[in-house]
Amino acid sequence: MEFSHQVDKNYNILLIEDDVDQAYLYKMVFDLEHLPLYVAANIETAISMIREKTPNVILLDFIYEESSGESVLQKLKSELADSDIPIVVFTNTVKKVAVEKFLSLGATHFWSEAGNSPTLLAEKMKEFLALTKKSP
């Protein structure tokens, strides 16, 4: 699949994903699409990475084994209180109540994983970056 959106190589995308296999799959696909993806397995690593290399966007897998996705999102929003870095929550949950909750907790966008492959998520990310034009 070819994408029409070109992405500035200076973009930084942070994925917070605690499933090692999923993280590896997303990293491989994003690399193939020339999307610079950094992966954090937990909130502590994510915060450290945010401080070190400010991302243009944060992708948060909301289903977390070690803690609730809600607490991870709340910690992120607390850390990013003075920042306008968008947080995109993606999960298999597509219930309206859940989406509203994600957004009320500080997520700026919600993308469903249901029926979407990592390649489609990469395409969505290219479109998102092209629309927001949030380059460093």
Image: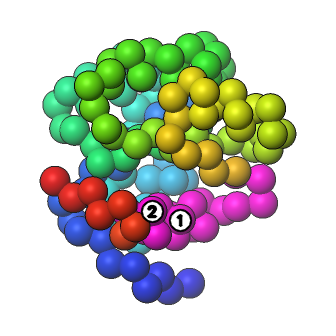
Q: Which residue is drawn at 61% across and 46% down?
A: 110
Assess whether residue 24 is covered by the magenta stretch: no
What's under tag 1, amino acid-wise?
Lys
Which span is picked out in magenta? 113-129
User: In the displayed structure, does residue 112 sit left or right of residue 17?
Assistant: right
Q: Quadrant of the N terminus?
A: bottom right
What's under tag 2, amino acid-wise?
Phe
User: In the displayed structure, does residue 77 sit left or right of residue 101?
Assistant: left
Instruction: Let me know if residue 20 appears in the view.
Output: no
* Residue 36 to residue 71: above or below: below
Quarter-wise, where is residue 28 in the image? bottom left
User: In the displayed structure, does residue 72 sit left or right of residue 64?
Assistant: left
Query: Residue 92 appears at what percent x and percent y?
Result: 75, 43
Say which of 80 and 2 sits in front: 80
Say which of 134 and 51 sits in front: 134
User: In the displayed structure, does residue 25 sit left or right of residue 54?
Assistant: right
* Residue 8 to residue 118: above or below: below
Quarter-wise, where is residue 43 in the image? top left
Contact, mark 2 vs mark 1 (Cβ under 8 Å): yes
Q: Is mark 1 on a helix, strand or loop?
A: helix
Give the labeled residue for mark 1: 124
Say which of 7 and 108 sits in front: 108
Q: Which residue is drawn at 20% across and 27% down?
A: 51
Q: Is mark 2 on a helix, strand or loop?
A: helix
Instruction: Let me know if residue 127 appears in the view.
Output: yes
**What's the mark number on residue 128?**
2
Q: Residues within 10 Å of mark 2 (few under 14, many from 20)?
A: some
Assess whether residue 118 is covered by the magenta stretch: yes
Q: How is the image coloured?
A: rainbow
Q: How crowded is mark 1: few (under 14 residues within 10 Å), some or many (20 or more)?
A: some
Query: Residue 97 appears at what percent x and percent y?
Result: 80, 32
